[in-house]
Image (spheres, coloured by chain):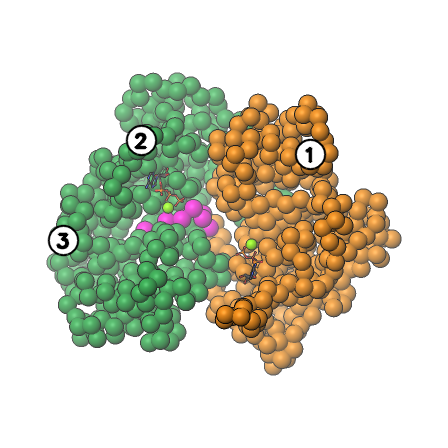
Amino acid sequence: MSAGMNDLKKQTRSGSHRPLLEVRNLKKYFPIHKGMMRKVVNHVRAVDDVSFFVREGETLGLVGESGCGKTTVSRCILRAFHPTSGEILFREADDQITDLSPLDRAALRRFRPQMQMIFQDPFGSLNPRMTIFEIISEPLYVNGLRSRADRTDQAAELLKLVGLRPEFMQRYPHAFSGGQRQRIGIARALALHPRLVVADEPVSALDVSVQAQVLNLMLDLQEKLNLTYLFVAHDLSVVKHISDRVCVMYVGKVVEMAATKELFEAPRHPYTAALMMAVPVPDPDQRHIIQDLPGEVASPANPPSGCYFHPRCAFAAEVCRTQTPQLREISPDHFVSCHRAEELQLAGIDENKERQ
Amino acid sequence: MPSSIKPVTQPSASSLSQEPLLRVEDLKAYFFMDEGTVRAVDGVSFDVFPGKVVGIVGESGCGKSVTMKAILQILEPSAKIISGKVTLRSRFNSLDPDSPEELVELTGLHPDSRKIRKIRGSEIALIPQEPMAAFSPVYTVGNHIIETILLHQDVSKQEARQIAIDVFRSVGISMPEQRIDSYSWELSGGLRQRAIIAMALSCNPRLLIADEPTTAIDVTTQAQILKLLRKLQEERQTSIIFITHDLGVIAQMADEVVVMYLGMVMEKGPVHTIFKDAKHPYTQALLRSIPSVQSTPRLKLPTIAGSIAHPFNRPAGCPFHPRCKHFMRGVCDASQPALAPIAEGHFVSCFLYSSESMSPVATGRQAVPATENNP
Ligand SMILES: Nc1ncnc2c1ncn2[C@@H]1O[C@H](COP(=O)(O)OP(=O)(O)OP(=O)(O)O)[C@@H](O)[C@H]1O
Ligand SMILES: Nc1ncnc2c1ncn2[C@@H]1O[C@H](COP(=O)(O)OP(=O)(O)OP(=O)(O)O)[C@@H](O)[C@H]1O
Ligand code: SF4
Ligand code: SF4
Ligand SMILES: [Mg+2]
Ligand SMILES: [Mg+2]
């Protein structure tokens, strides 16, 4: 259990900035088969007891290195995966809170329009044989908007919203650049007025000069439409740029979650601190900043005992080898899972040593 | 016993160290295809000095990899070097630190000639952009490295194996005696990248071309690899051409920076000049548009309008003009600015600083000045 995690129901009473989504003790294990009989010999603990929440209207950045389970968490939330265990609590507009984790297809139908996904690959995620109009208006049609004129109007609105010209509607995806395709993907995701948008690495495949355009667009749309984002990425600079709060994962677990500025300036988990020190800063005067963290990311099929980070941690003590640290609220709204969080003095990243 | 990992001591009173190791002059390499001609590399010039790291930065498709393939003469058959000159100061014996040198014009060599094949690997080694392409899945990583060593050095198979193990150890691979017998797909991303670096270093090259060596790997592994490359460069005085689209990595690694856009050099200069005093509108805009871990969360970033032109559809005149805030009609779209010096070692290709142009272009396509919200 994540002792100290803000309780969704309690938050309801306190009013503003209530969680829209709360994930509790989520686990997703994938079986590893072996041999002719496809016997299950082990499990990949892709998501291993993850808890976090996303408040209405905010962006929670979910960050971590490759294979730490970010995509699996997102897919569980959108119920593309059936979680092994845990709760996925979602608040609807009328304040009713539902656990999505046990629901079947039929029961999930009501929630589908409320949660949408933006994908990483702007090239693979759009059907090349559909026009932009068809791509964007498909969700409208599926949800009962049968009049073509109405759908055309709405598609035009959506295109304008994401900064594309409605005249382009009859073109096919190949006629658009990566950044434009990502805008199309965003327009499609917004067609049904979702309340939660899960964006899995939405700018990772884009050119650097185009990344900023898409990030700015997402910030604009959030303001205009009061959207809530779960923004998944491995790039700490991008995550810092877009997020109100950040949740850091390591080998299927949440190691730290806090307000963006606080997390970057005063990390409390040794992994978070190491991750920040490893980011190459675009300033040749700060070359000392690259530090290396020894060793390799542990395998989620065969994680170490105790704290999963202990084989690489400079501060590991005996207790770290034997006991799994729990995620706890170490100061208001700052969650850490480290046995030694209180006593450690970790360096963060100074803000505003900015380029001119 | 010949060892490939002898540190190269600089010939003491050598005035040669002031001379570039590699000089690339106005290099052009085009792809000729049914749909049209891709001017992938369209007049690139830069120097690599001994023991220095030249960072080449630019967005996807700007011609970074093709430039390197052209230098090494390993272009695909559909590509041709149209013009330009690549000169290398080549040692007669790459294992002898005091070896006499000769100037070799790489562009004048046949791609299959003995000479260029000898230079590839022993003088210039490439860390290719696709790490999986470096190793065949049916041979162990040791097989690959031993084969490379046997190709370039006069040693026995047993000695080659020992050299390979030593290089593995020098790039920080633990248990090198065992790891050398693994297949590339058995190694983690970080170990595989180290193995590729080991293979590149196995014949003691003086120039290492690292094409996006850390793009596919995680940030903590990236930090390890960057540190390793810097250590090797310092210990062996190896020159490195470091290619990336990550400006953070460039700032950490490079001595000199070359900024490319659509096959051309927009600006080049010392790393401090580029990051603190960039002059070209593209460099300036690029630096402003990247999010940094040091910037304030949730502030809008200044963006570059539009997107990179399709390679078949290159704008006339300055390649950046359809996106440039300082676009001057009738000037920037009429001819292409030359790469001109504006300070010691600092070159910019932009009409804001010099009226010198390359070759006049007959028909300039009309372009509207870019605005911030122009999709
Ligand atoms: N369908 C699956 N079957 C088996 N294992 C899986 C499956 N999907 C993911 N995994 C494993 O679960 C772990 C978490 O994967 P996931 O894709 O969620 O990571 P991620 O954080 O999104 O990584 P990346 O940054 O590379 O996208 C990995 O070890 C992965 O190999
Ligand atoms: N084999 C090929 N056939 C045709 N065009 C090619 C080929 N290889 C590269 N090109 C084109 O040449 C241009 C330069 O490509 P190059 O691979 O050098 O880019 P790059 O700067 O290395 O990009 P990236 O950062 O994506 O690796 C691109 O427009 C590309 O589409
Ligand atoms: S619990 Fe121990 S090993 Fe884990 S991060 Fe904290 S100090 Fe390091
Ligand atoms: S030459 Fe003109 S269009 Fe090109 S960068 Fe300079 S000002 Fe901009
Ligand atoms: Mg993922
Ligand atoms: Mg490339």
Q: Chain of mark 3?
A: B
Q: Which mark is residue A140?
A: 1
Q: Amino acid at mark 3?
A: Arg
Alpha carbons under labels 2 and 3: distance apart = 32 Å
Q: Which mark is residue B282?
A: none
* Nearest to the observer: residue B299 or residue B145: B145
Which residue is at the far front? A37
Q: Secondary structure at mark 1?
A: helix
Which residue is at the far right? A13
**Residue at 18% over, 62% down:** B152
Give the class, few, some or many, for how many residues have Cα within 10 Å of label 2's Cα (few <14, many ≥20).
few
Give the class, few, some or many, for how many residues have Cα within 10 Å of label 3's Cα (few <14, many ≥20).
few
Q: Position of residue A212 (x, y in %)?
A: 55, 40
Q: Chain of mark 1?
A: A
Q: Which residue is mark 2?
A: B34
Which residue is at the far bottom? A318
Task: Check residue A288 for magenta coloring.
Answer: no
Q: Position of residue B89 (x, y in %)?
A: 18, 51
Q: Are marks 1 and 3 in contact (CB under 8 Å)?
A: no
Q: Which residue is mark 3?
A: B114
Q: Chain of mark 2?
A: B
